[in-house]
Each structure stands twice: as structure tokens, then as C-alpha cells.
Amino acid sequence: MNADYLPRLIDSQIKDRLGWKGAVCVEGPKWCGKTWSCLEVAKSSFMVGSPEGNFSNRRLAEENPLLALDGEVPHLVDEWQEVPGIWDAVRMEVDKRGDVGQFLLTGSSTPRKKSVMHSGTGRITKLRMGTMSLYETKDSLGNVSISSLFDGDFTDHMTGDVDLRDLAGFIVRGGWPGVLKLGEKAGIENAKDYIVSFLEEDLPRIDDDRSYRDARKMRVLLESLARNEATTASISKICADIEAATETEIKQETVGEYLEVLKRCFLVEDQEAFSFSARSRTRLKLAPKRHLTDPSLACALMSLTPEKLLGDLNTFGFLFEALVEHDLKIYAQAIGGRILHYQDYSGKEIDAVLELEDGRWGAFEIKLGARQIDKAADNLLKISKKINEDNPVNAPVFLAVICGLSNAAYRRKDGVYVLPLTALRP
């Protein structure tokens, strides 16, 4: 056990799944804390990427993947994707033992399907882990429960003043557990190093396809994603950005391949579009919002500091939205839901939709400043009214505005909640 370990919301999910699956694979970006979380549960471990003995663990696993599985259960195999044969060995061993809670796997990238013989269905369950939310870093009071909103359990209360400079600091620092105690500057430099490390070290090792090895175009693609953070920017727009910056042509198919590489390395995540049942008369757009896995990476790619954000409130607003949606995704997963967005062909949009497994959903508008609350609430009410008129079965359970600078959590007279980001928990 690590005395300095900050508990994560995913911890209980890992324990729960070990109770009904033979193996649990925790996936996510490098340095987000996967190994630390799994070591809190594991009784033994095998570190594939350990440099000890001139990387003897990797060589042993390549010779015989079963050697990586020897140990008291639950047994952790860290960074299994470095030796893809481990996946099939785990699947076979789970079948052989016929028991749950046998293995934990962590992975920072997804091998191509040709590297893995079997999907693992029925034996291995996957969990997605991201960087830390403000509730996990202790920067949110956590006195407003999102899950309680679905039950109407809410009481107005003061949550304290929020400093705009603090919000800017949270964005540029990011949710990387290894830098939380090292200060803001360390967080900024870490995000820059993360991008450089990916381009110079990880990208060339993805696979043998040379089309993925143009680090210059990949960086320009990442910069385009940063400028279009929290939007539904099309691939054609991203192509135009790359062509303008590199003065060379690039096909949309190539950009699509680059995006798939970024997804496989957990650097880019799609916030999918919300859709009603087939009976609904409302036609919705299906383009996803694209996010870098942590808002700090967008700041690093655009050379942003807290002071620069304070001087550019428009960019600040987009990155604040990215921060909120990053945290909402973590909170949604903790309560068995998912985060989507709403956009219809009449031009109406909802920043974030939290949908539970039973189909109930709540709608969130995200605004940095308190002066924007009235407009955001009015937008939610108009869309909700349209949905109710179309098909009341599809109506949201609640409407809420998440605000950066509100000093209270309260329910307006029109029924819309106003919630400070720094007060939220699952």
C-alpha cells in the first residue's frame, strides 16, 4: 500500500469487477495512475516494462507469456501491450482456473487486432481510466452529488467564492497524479514533455506502418485538435489546418488514420452525440466532440499559461468547457452512465448530456462566468420544451448550468440548477 496514494473513483469499480470477472484490464493514457490504482488491489505484480536486468521481464514474457502470470491473485501485469501474447495467455489461464478475480492488466495503448488472437469476451472486462478529476485532486468540495439530481435530492447552499486564476491553474496543471504536489510550473512543463515524448518515443513504436511516423504532421494535427477543443470540428477542417501549416497536401483518410492512432494511445477521446429512440421526430447531428485526454495538453500545444488564459477569455471558456466535460465523464462512469452532447439540425445545442443505463438523462450547459447563467438556462428550457412537445418520454430528468464562478449551488425558480464545478462529485 502507498501511503501517499490519493484514492480514485475507479478504485471501487476495479474491486467490483474483480468480483465477477476473471480479469480486469484498466486502460488509459500513460501516467494517469493506472499502476498505482491497481497496486492498491493486487497481491502480486509483473512489470513488463521494468528496466531491471536489462529488461529481463519483457524477454521472459516474449519467450513464454505464462511466466508473466505467476503470482498471488489478484496478480497485476503492468503494460501488457508491450508483449501482446500476454492477452491470450490471460484468457486461456482464466478458462483453465475457472475462477474470478485472477488478474489485473494495465495498458497505455491498444495493439492492432492482428497482434491479439482473441477478444477476451467473457473472461476479461475493460475499464477506462483518465487523469484525475477536481474531486479526486481535492480541488472540488464534493458537496453536490450529480447522482442525487436524478432523484430530486437537492438543497440550496453556499459553496464559497471561486477565483478565476485558480480555475486557469487547474486547466494548465491538468489531472496528472505525479505532479499534484510539485506545483503549477511542474504541471505545465509535464504537459509539454508529454507531447514531446509521444511524438519522439511512442509514435515511432506504434507499429510498422510508416504512415504514422510523420511527427511533424502529427504535431500539427494535435495543435489543430487543441485549437478546436470541445467542438465538433470536421476532418476536412483539420485537413485544412495541417495543409496550411505544412504547405503539403494530406488526405482525409490519412487524417482519419492519424486520429485512430491517437485514440489507440488514449490521447484523444470522442464525446459521442446523444440520440433519442427511433420514434422521435427530432433529427440530431451525430458528429462527436473531440477532446484531448487532459485539458493541460491543449494548453501545452498552444503554449498557454494561466496569465494568457486570463487575457483571452474566449479561449478560457472553451478550455473550461473541456475541463468540465473531462470531469463529468469520470463522474458519469462512477455512477454507471456516460457523457454525450446534443446538437440538432435547427442549431440548438446542449454542451453535455449525462445518460444513465436505465435511459434517464440530465442536460448541462457549461459557462465560465455567472453573467452567462440566464442565457444558458433559457437555452436548456427551450430545448427541453421542444423535446417534451415532440415526445415526452424523451424528456430530461433535470436541467443544470455548471458555472465556473458561482459561489452557491441552487435551484432557480424556473427549475434549472446552477452548480459550481468546484462543488461537484458523482
Image: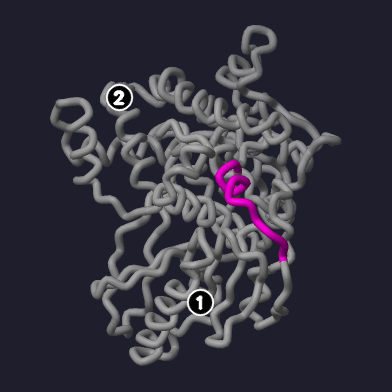
Residue nearest the viewer, comparing 31 with 411:
411
Above/below status of 215 relative to 411: above
The quadrant of the image that shows the N terminus is top right
Q: Does residue 25 show up?
A: no
Q: Amino acid at mark 1?
A: Gly
Element under disc 2: loop
Q: How many marks?
A: 2
Q: Which residue is labeled 1 in the image?
A: 359
Q: Which mark is residue 209?
A: 2
Horizontal arrangement in the rendering, residue 233 relative to residue 89 (left or right): left
Q: Does residue 384 show up?
A: yes
N-terminal of the pair, mark 2 or mark 1, is 2
Tell me where the magenta segment starts and ends, as one range.
159-169
The quadrant holding residue 212 is top left
Horizontal arrangement in the rendering, residue 74 relative to residue 112 (left or right): right
Residue 309 picture location, percent across and down: 47, 42
Q: Is residue 164 magenta?
A: yes
